Image (tube, coloured by chain):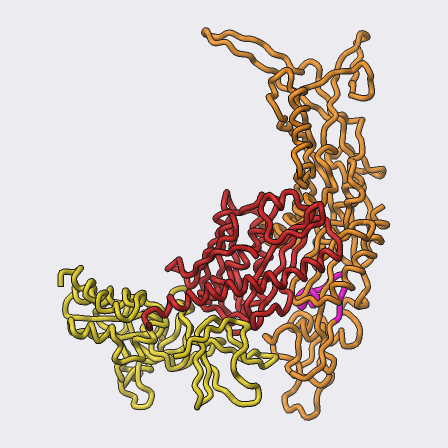
Amino acid sequence: MSEIEASTTLLNRVDGSAKLQIKSTQIICSVTGPIEPKSRQELPSTSSLSVIVRPDVGVTSTREKNLEEKIRVILNQAIAGELYPRQNIQVTLQILGAGESKNYTVKELTGMVNCSYLALIDAGVALRFSFGAQCFTIGHDDVLVVDPTGEDLKISKSSHVVVYDVKEGKVDQLLYADSLGSFTEEQVYEVLGKAIKEVEGIHAKFREIIQTKVEKDYVWQF
Amino acid sequence: MSEDSNPQQSLKLMSFPPSVLSRISPEISLQRHLSIGLRPNLRKFDEFRDIQLNDGGLSRYSANNTNGQSDVLGSSILRSGSTMVVCTIRGQIVEEDILGEAENEDADAINAIFAKELQDAKPKETLKDNAVIYPLVEVERGRVGPPTDEEMILSQRIYENFLHSGILKRSALKVNVGLKSVDENGEEQILYKGENDQFDFGPKRMWSYTLSAEFKVFSRSGPLYELLWTSLISALRSTKLPHAYIDENAADIKVPIKMRGNFGTVREQYQITCDANKSEPLSLELDQISYGTNFAVIDIVKSLETTLPEEEGEEEGEAMDVDTEQKSVLLIDIEGEEEEFCAKKVIQVSVDSKGESLKSLTLSGGIDRDSLRTAIQLAKSRSRVLDGVVN
Amino acid sequence: MSHTLILPGDKLPVSSDSAVIIGPGIHNTPISKEIIPITAGILQLSGTQKTIHLEYNSRRYIPQVNDLVVGVVTGSFGDVFRVSLSDFTANVSLSAFAFPNATKKNRPNLKIGNLVYARVSAADPIVDVEIECMDPTTGKDGGFGLLEDGYVFTVGLAFARSLLYNADHAVLDLLVKRCQFEIAIGVNGKIWIKTDELKHTLACAKAIEGCQFVQGEQFKDVVNQCFKDLGL
């Protein structure tokens, strides 16, 4: 089980924010929305989603563009866009610590998906379901490593990110999976199977974090 | 397309030609097609687009080169449906960082020790020996401007997948540097390592090629990644790297100088020149070559005839009736606006040319196990077929 | 108040065959017609009337009919004023005729930057949201209209709701003992306050802002501290 440390409601100029740390990967996420979109972003019947990823070092490049697209695909499935027609939801992710070399994106992607879940909850944006992500590597010895370190990644044969949606505390459907490297069909099924328990564990952790957040929000009531 | 007008319907139904309907309501258009067992592009559900490949004669080494002394080292032209992809490979020579002090006379010996240590230090980094390629994708849309998100994402995906695939090793890009000299008879000749046994010219510096791949896409009609990848593989297979040599006159000359009491040395720059006549094919790790296929899983609604056209804004092509029986179909090789727009569940998979090991896999949307299994099986056989086309 | 925390995807204690009235945080999906929670909050059930909603705090205000709001006039076009209820959100419209005794000749005189206290009269996400500055049943001002002078600040939406709907809220009770003030609380999180003295205004605003982060029994300390800091 990966050790997640997270806190919400840190930034007071945005609608929702969260900061999350898994091992040496550290992400901060802010959500603003639903807000008035630029006219080219406007969709007549649903909300538009803009995702902005900022790297920990240097300026935004195609690497971040690719990550933005992956996150957009995942979040678009979760956000109940029909409630916000002609509106825009802006998710900004700043990587504070990548925890992996520039050749890999799995740890950052996992962290960003998990962090944006907490920030969306903090912003009160309508979600159809909860979701959680976990990353894996398979080494040259064909051993599956859950939540690898940057060093594990360097010597891995393949790397995987799996995002599941969570309903009633149980994994329901696969939202997204991304695998890169060299691997077999059986290994894909193994990773997808293993991820179920992992995501459920992460969700249980999220529930604690959100419980703390709600208690803090309503502190004046007690 | 709304020819099934309901007599009880008091509102007058509007009718549109298929091409218009596909734009204003792609979901209905796609569902109507699927309900009669056809795709909007008139292919069967599991039918691939035909792929035609040739080298286009763009490369200087191409047999049907019409371009004279071009700087293109490898090329391919891919046609699939209405889409055309032109891929050209260009190269540059860069000086490599070498381990150990470059100035040190014993650099070779030190390098050898480092190399041994690196080998001993286990485990080895997977990507250490893999070479990269720098892709530039341009999707022609009849207007100019900064690269679109799609172009940037395609470039990045090609870059990442190429690096992780290990198709090209760093060692394959090393320049075998020759020396140009004038022999006793006053004739110029270029000596290369391996060609001449007495030749022991060993520069301490090393040079490598860096390759860039430029893609131009015409009449885009669907997701492009798989087509670009296939054209890249084809272009790389036709790529040849020119030999390069150093002019003897400009090689490694140290000139001590003394100026206003300061001592120093002026070092002559190496003049490295590509040999116009000699070249060798780029050596690829053939068993690492992979080919990609994309699939869309579309939920179809069986009793579509009884349902009214949905309003815009109803999602994912599902009908309003709750109790209609749903089944999903797997569409191979996404093409056309309707398919691309409605494809919320997408499988993208790359399989090596033997159809065994997977190289990359991206699933988005709620993909079920059965669809995934079928997709991987089809991608495996597709990969073997594509390998045949590329060879 | 029960403390059941609900997250998106959790099962709600509603049966599919009996009718329920759903409130904030609950969504009836357009196709499958399921009743699902769409955010994380504390479950609020009323046994008798079969209503269900989630109590959650957020900072982005989404207009609902009959909400009482504080807005800033940002422009006027013909017979319509544009009013901002929260930053970066599309402005809402306030008709010049949505004022007591307003006629073509007798237009309300609102300038850009003026504050109004208003009621949301139409809130369809597809079209512009409309607000009005009169009580629709009586046609009188009903406490709505231009807010002159005073000071506006922002609090969390959940805290604003609690201040507005509990007339004897502990914070307001404490402030009443310190000074006289006029207050307009919008559920969009904007609170307007006006006292006779600038120092009192600032102290009240600081106190209300501060109280949303502490427990009920500490309200008194916060209020005292805020007044003390300003030498009152």
Residue C72: say if magenta.
no
Q: In which quarter of the image is residue C171?
A: bottom left
Q: Which of B309 and B381 is in front in this view?
A: B381
Question: Residue farthest to the bottom?
Answer: B8
Q: Position of residue A197 (x, y in %)?
A: 61, 63
The answer to whether residue A191 shows anywhere in this view is yes
Q: Say above or below: A49 vs C52.
A: above
The answer to whether residue A81 shows anywhere in this view is no
Q: In which quarter of the image is residue B100?
A: top right
For the point 41% across and 61% down, the residue is A9
Q: Position of residue C204 (x, y in %)?
A: 21, 68
* Letter of the chain in red: A
Colour chain C appears in = yellow
Specify the quadrant that holds the N terminus of chain C. bottom left
Specify the quadrant that holds the C terminus of chain C. bottom left
For the point 24% across and 66% down, the residue is C207
Question: Residue farthest to the left?
Answer: C232
Residues drawn in magenta: B329-343
For the point 82% across and 17% down, the residue is B196
Colour chain B appears in = orange
